Image (spheres, rainbow, N blue to C red):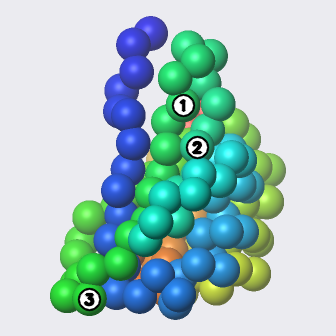
Amino acid sequence: MPRRFDHIDLRVRRLSGVRHFYERLLPALGFTREVGIEGWLTYEAETSGGVPEFFGVTESAQHVPNESRIAFWADSIEEVNRLATIAVEAGAQHVEGPMVYDDENYYAVFFEDPSGNRLEICCRSG
């Protein structure tokens, strides 16, 4: 299957205010290799095709969070629960779940990073 996206560049008000959060969450999500780029907090994930996907966070003093959400895939309910615990321990805000949503096949946790960006970890079954 072809890649669906290459990378995510996320903006935050202050990088120092989210660094601990993303240093805990991103490796747990599989973005295990930190990449040193000036002014960024960037982690790469290994892929089967050899070209890494990456998640980068950088500072934008005028950043205002909006209703957009980034959802991360988990393979199981247990994985959602494990990652939800890590997110909460790292400082996630406005946490909803983890729980079943919409129908019996969708299990997720919704939360915000310390800068107000909306994130989700979910799995689907059936």
CB contact under 8 Å: marks 2 and 3? no
User: Which residue position is annotated with label 2?
Assistant: 44
Q: x%, y% of residue 81? A: 75, 60
Residue type of the residue flagged with mark 2:
Glu
Whichever of callouts 2 and 1 sits on the residue coming sooner in the sequence is 2
Quadrant housing residue 45: top right
Which secondary structure, mark 3?
loop
Whether residue 101 is visible, yes or no, is no
Which secondary structure, mark 2?
strand
Whichever of callouts 2 and 3 sits on the residue coming sooner in the sequence is 2
CB contact under 8 Å: marks 2 and 1? yes
Residue type of the residue flagged with mark 3:
Ala
- Residue appearing at x 79%, y 50% in the figure: 78
Whichever of callouts 1 and 3 sits on the residue coming sooner in the sequence is 1
- Residue appearing at x 71%, y 69% in the figure: 24
Position of 47 with respect to 13 (left or right) is: right
Tell me the distance, in whole angstroms, between the alpha carbons under discs 1 and 3: 29 Å
Q: x%, y% of residue 20? A: 66, 80
Q: Quarter holding the C terminus?
A: top right
Q: Where 27 falls versus 61 (above or below)?
A: above
Q: Which mark is residue 61?
A: 3
Q: Residues within 10 Å of mark 2 (few under 14, many from 20)?
A: many
Q: x%, y% of residue 53? A: 50, 36
Q: Where 46 falls versus 79 (above or below)?
A: above
Which secondary structure, mark 1?
loop
Residue type of the residue flagged with mark 1:
Pro
Q: Which mark is residue 114?
A: none
Q: Quarter holding the N terminus?
A: top left
User: Which residue position is annotated with label 1?
Assistant: 52
Whether residue 36 is visible, yes or no, is yes
Tell me the distance, in whole angstroms, between the alpha carbons under discs 2 and 1: 6 Å
